[in-house]
Image: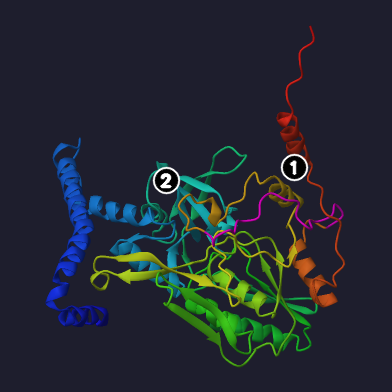
Amino acid sequence: MKKYLLIGASAFILGAGSMAYVSQQALASAQPRAKTYRMLGLFGDVLNTVENQYVTEVDDTKLIQAAIDGMLTSLDPHSGYLDPESFDDMRDQTRGEYGGLGLEVTSEDGVVKVISPMDGTPAEKAGIKAGDYITSVNGESVLGLTVTEAVKQMRGKPGETVSLTIAREKSDPFDVKLVREVIKPKSATARLEGDYILLRIGSFNEKTTDEAEAAFAEMKAKNPKAKGLILDLRNNPGGLLDQAVGVSDLFLEGGEIVSQRGRDPRDVERYNARTGDMTGGMPMVVLINSGSASAAEIVAGALQDRKRAELVGTTSFGKGSVQTVIPLRGGIDGALKLTTAKYFTPSGRSIQKTGIEPDLEVALTREEAQIIANRTYQFSEASFKNALNADEGKVRRGAHEPAEAPPETFDVKKDFQIARAEDVLRYGSVAATPKLPKPTARMAEIVNKARVAEAKPPATPQK
């Protein structure tokens, strides 16, 4: 409102000699508006044609909702339209309780893709993995459906069985049967790992900061002499920004945690930590991987930039955008989920598309090391065709041999990344931790040899 008042005052001050200039400006601004009105008229013509000529009767409400969702999803992968039912579901999810399977999903080229299964949910217990494609629900194809429509089919009454058809890289499609549960994912849990406390945060909902603080306090009471903390943010798809700020604040004594910047360069909002580190300065290591996204990356980036913790694992997902949920008519007509800003770590880094690289790169398994080396399959923000661009000149690190992977003698029942995090705490820093031999990427060597062979000119046939 203030902006409009200022514009009005400026126009009032203009003298008669400026009227021609004003007319030109008005004409210039009217031209793109006229084009917009023409395109809205085109939309009405298309809707009318579909209503009258489509092979079966159509539901106008569904058509218009789909059009709105299509408009928003064309902007970036994380914007979209939530109909009233989906808006209610989203609010239930952020409150930390809803009925479903426990999947964080998105859409890619009309296919539903899993970002991450949530800890302790039917999806995680069934072995569904980040990057899996869901092609049908209860035998009905979800190809071409919006995320909202697909999620509707997966949500429902607890106790009911749901069958998902999963397409996975280098695997034939297969069916998984799950039973819906009331999803009450405890977003933060903790346990003792020898002399260290392992604090696991699986998502960021309204309860996360309180749950993380309580879980840590419980373990600290069990072992008051604990020597360090491992914060596990692997496969954490993100969630509420204020909870990411709250969790970061638990470990910092002040200073910036994150900033977000909108379209206007002057539109900057900064979030700062208050005095008080709940651990009393306990040494920390943060675990991340390609499934660590959004709010999880805010926490990891803040603790890394502020030199509060070192990071172990693999490069994070790379979602550096902020979505604002905007209710329409108080939620009666649903809501818009609109990307309104990018976030930046305390040092000014935008990790959009590029992700946060760990201080010590450690593949969880030897198979994962091969994947990283070959880049045959790396699901990240950069995988989306319409993802927002990264900062100029920045690209996500390409195929390479990871620094470390489990040696053949490592016990496969143990978690190699946790073991290396414990080593970093034991030796005091990543720099002081003895490094393991770099894993050999045999497939990458074969691929490189093939490329060299292709680059050579063909041999001249002998006569």
Q: Quadrant of the N terminus?
A: bottom left
Residue 376 percent across, percent down from the top left: 65, 44
Report the magenta residues as a range: 390-410
**Residue tagged 2:** 110
Q: Earlier in the sequence, mark 2 or mark 1?
A: 2
Q: Quadrant of residue 426?
A: bottom right
Residue 360 percent across, percent down from the top left: 75, 65
Q: Is residue 331 left or right of residue 266?
A: left
Instruction: Report the disc number at residue 64.
Output: none
Q: Residue visible at 63% across and 90% down?
A: 253
**Residue tagged 1:** 444
Residue 243 percent across, percent down from the top left: 51, 78
* Between 270 and 153, the one nearer to me in the picture: 270
Viewer-nearest of discs 2 and 1: 1
* Between 459 and 111, the one nearer to me in the picture: 459
Q: Is residue 447 visible?
A: yes
* Between 326 and 345, the one nearer to me in the picture: 345
Residue 442 percent across, percent down from the top left: 79, 42
User: Is residue 165 found inside the magenta-colored segment of the image?
Assistant: no
Amino acid type, label 2: Gly
Secondary structure under tag 1 reads helix
